[in-house]
Image (tube, rainbow, N blue to C red):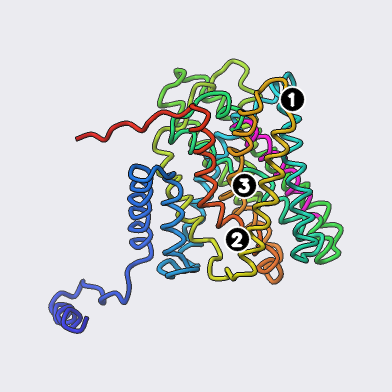
Amino acid sequence: MMPPRQGWEALQERLLFLPPLPEQLDPLALFALLLVAGLLVGETLFRRFGLSRIVGYVLAGAVAGPGVLGWLDRETVALAKPVADAALGLLLLETGRHLDLRWLNANRSLLASALAESGLAFVSIFTFALLAVGLSPGWSAATAAITMASAPAVVLLTAQENRAQGQVTQRTLLLTAISCALSFVVFALVLGVVHAEQAGDWLNAIVHPLWVVCGSAGIGLACARLALAIAARQAKGSAAQVFILVAVALLAIGVARMLAVPVFLSLFMMGAALNLADQTKVLAYTRLPEGHWTLAIVLFVVTGAMLPLDKLSWLTGLQAIGLIVVRGLAKFAGVVLTGRNDLPAAKRRLVGVGIQPLSATAIFMGAELAAIYPEVSGQALLLPLLAAALMELAGPQLCRYAFKQAGETEPPPEPRR
């Protein structure tokens, strides 16, 4: 670098506006290059090897992140996290819109399947973390709350990526939405348990969960009503309605961040409120544009960079694999043993495979908990975060396998020449 540096310094003597030669690439430029790399890796894996694009995005972030090569340091990842928050929020908004409470009331077997697979997953993970790993009851409950749900962003994007439609796809999306809602309720309760265990602070143990639940519900309901009120004056399915939906979602994200309420929970609540309150189908046929795949790239690259791969050892790796196996069997059994009246056994088994993904939501739940007690949470949350790291790679493939085996996917369009 000496000749270029000397040449640059010589130019600086004549051109006063030139800045000093940078010691390293600007973090924003580096992050932009990483997003491009993630896109290229994802497309290559999808078109040549039949793997999910999401795997490529996560791999790019994980390799370049602090846990491996360190091209992205923790400060750069922290700067990118608000964008990833927005991406996850918008995807959870769509997940919440799949949560039709009226239909659930009519279809009790679906609700039974969701309660069975989520309940079995929580109990199994809690028992494993408490007895096999040796975590305290509070952090065992936190581990179970973080990892009990399926990954709504992965399931939704995998279905869109493969243009999947059918009974297995629809049941997987619905069970994911319900288990996500249940895990959010459990997550709020676990916040109180962690406060009580770590600090013996019963005021925070009671008020903090209420603040999270009521704040998220209030933000979600208010923003849903605002979006419906404005969108009702526009043509149905128009670009104006899409713009209103995204703009109000961003408003919800901003308010949630100001009030220290989880963004992912607020946007999920907004989606569920839209589904429930949209009696005249104002926004029922309005979907996020294809551009939300751009947000997905940001989300999974940042998620990959947040994974604590530098703390992975043979022992923690075995514990994470054990958690994945226990969780997977519980969720699979919960689906297979219920819903016999409205879905054949073969399709129930495929749904049990399709709901396995665990990723971004777990990472962001862990970040919320880590912000409360950073001195303890680093080690206590290592198990669920490492499990999420492994399932970032395996989960999308399991979901895609289920949709494909059900015969509900379409081949990708031929690239333009």
Residues drawn in magenta: 173-192
Distance from the alpha carbon under mark 1 to that under mark 2: 33 Å
Q: Which residue is mark 1?
A: 109
Distance from the alpha carbon under mark 3 to that under mark 1: 34 Å
Distance from the alpha carbon under mark 2 to that under mark 3: 27 Å
Determine the secondary structure under disc 3.
helix
Q: Check whether the beta carbons of the residues at disc 1 and disc 2 lie within 8 A of each other.
A: no
For marks 3 and 1 on the same chain, the one whose residue lies earlier in the sequence: 1
Secondary structure, magenta segment, majority class: helix
- Looking at the image, residue 138 sits to the left or right of residue 407; the answer is right
Please check the rendered image and state whether residue 411 is part of the magenta-colored stretch, yes or no: no
Number of labelled discs? 3
Residue kind at label 1, given as amino acid type = Ser
Q: Locate residue 374, reporting x and y percent.
A: 67, 68
**Label 3 packing within 10 angstroms: few (<14), some (14-19), many (20+):** many
Frontmost of labels 2 and 3 is: 2
Frontmost of labels 3 and 1 is: 1
Q: Which mark is residue 256?
A: 3
Residue kind at label 3, given as amino acid type = Ala
Q: Check whether the beta carbons of the residues at disc 2 and disc 3 lie within 8 A of each other.
A: no
For marks 2 and 3 on the same chain, the one whose residue lies earlier in the sequence: 3
**Label 1 packing within 10 angstroms: few (<14), some (14-19), many (20+):** some
Determine the secondary structure under disc 2.
helix
The quarter holding residue 37 reads bottom left
